[in-house]
Image (cartoon, rainbow, N blue to C red):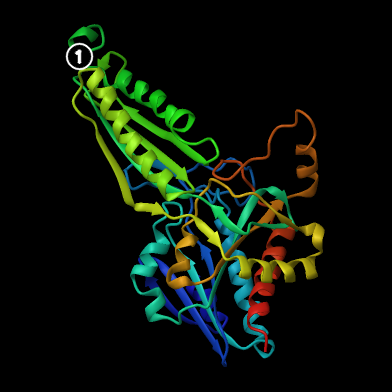
Amino acid sequence: MAAELRAAGFDVTEKVGGNGVVGVLKNGPGPVVLLRADMDGLPIVEQTGLPYASKVRTKDRFGNDVGVMHACGHDVHMTCFVGSARVLAALKGSWSGTLVFVAQPAEEIVAGARAMLDDGLYQRFPKPDYAIALHADPLTPAGVVSYTEGLALANSDTVDILVKGKGGHGAAPHQTVDPVVLAARIILDLQTIVSREVNPLDPCVVTVGSIHGGTKHNIIPNEVRLQLTVRTTKTEVRDHVLKAIDRIAKAAAVAARAPEPVVTVSLEEFTPATLNDVALTRKTVGVFKEVLGDGNVRERRPLMGAEDFGRFAAGKTPIFMYFLGTVPAELYDAAQKPDAPPLPGMHTDRYAPVPEPSIRAGVRTECLAVLNLLRK
């Protein structure tokens, strides 16, 4: 990414906030516009069958052997980013201002934006008057873009629960305190937070995405580890849910005569909701509709997914993230038929964005958004 930005004429700094790349292109007086692309992949073994499908395997940060796949479309994001850098550099006679192109790591653990900001992104480089990003959409036809005014994506929290017990022989469970059974009880009890503690009109998700414990069929282990993701849209709901998780886990342990579990909320992996600036959204969507046509620009509901792009709103910077359709028209149409199988979504091993016309539409819309803000 650094090499591509340099080739396009940007002044490039590497290793910002870890593995972040920042390219600056100054072109006379005018606003500063930040364009962001995230770079990281996911620990998934790709099953798309494409000739360029990832075959890479590596160790994750926990030592597990995993695949490596751009299952969230970040390869599309980077490609559009590079295309936009080339186009805008070639069109310097048509705009005035400063471009700040940010290639961001660690979005999937919602840590990269914070790391870059903590490393002085808005102090070491021109502070943006606007920040823009796109995200690949696995459920919308290629050539179509969609957007949300205001709340676009949710708060995201990462929670770990260490469930403690007393191990022993599987044939003598009465001599143990079984953390596997206790973990199962906690998982079921956690579902009551959303169904019975949160106002039904307030969106909320509590998902246990990982459970690890034990080594063999006939051994009751000493502990089980749970990994949770929590999604909310309001601060008061978030506070209530995190306290409820702690309360429910500890209460279940008391009922099972088990040691108190350890509940850890990772503040390093928290990201706030993404709130698109209404004025910037309307200004950008207006030019999208003018060029692409109303039928190719669609409004969408907020999602419970999360994105650390929301952190670029620091210092009251107006931000706008929109979604780029990546599904071939024939596949999209087939999926709309009754009883048709669903399209592969983000974070699945079969998500395969179609390069054309997705990338062309991504470059075109990113450039339109920037040029609309940097008109001479």
Between residues 39 and 246, which one lies in front from this camera angle?
A: 246
Image label count: 1
The residue sitting at the bottom extreme is 28
| Residue 10: image location, x then y, percent | 52, 82
Residue 305 placed where, x, y %? 53, 47
Q: Amino acid at mark 1?
A: Thr
Which quarter of the figure has residue 362? bottom right
Residue behind mark 1: 176
Closest to the observer: 178 or 200?
Answer: 200
Number of other residues with Cα within 10 Å of mark 1, as a class: few under 14, some 14 to 19, many 20 or more? some
Q: In the image, residue 112 lies at what x, y percent?
A: 41, 61
Q: Residue at x 39, y 57 (%)?
A: 111
Q: For this rendering, which residue is in front, 199 or 333?
A: 199
- Residue at the (55%, 50%) spot, across then down: 72
Residue 54 in the image: state x and y as whole percent: 54, 49
Helix, strand or loop at mark 1: loop
Q: Is residue 251 above or below residue 353?
A: above
The reply to whether residue 310 is visible in this rendering is yes
Q: Which of the 4 image quadrants contains residue 349?
A: top right
Residue at image coords 28%, 13%: 218
| Left or right position of 35 against 50 | left
Task: Inspect this view and state whether residue 64 appears.
Answer: no
Q: Quadrant of residue 284?
A: bottom right
Quarter the C terminus occupies:
bottom right
In-front residue for pair 286/57: 286
Q: Is residue 49 left or right of residue 226?
A: right
| Residue 194, placed above or below residue 75 | above
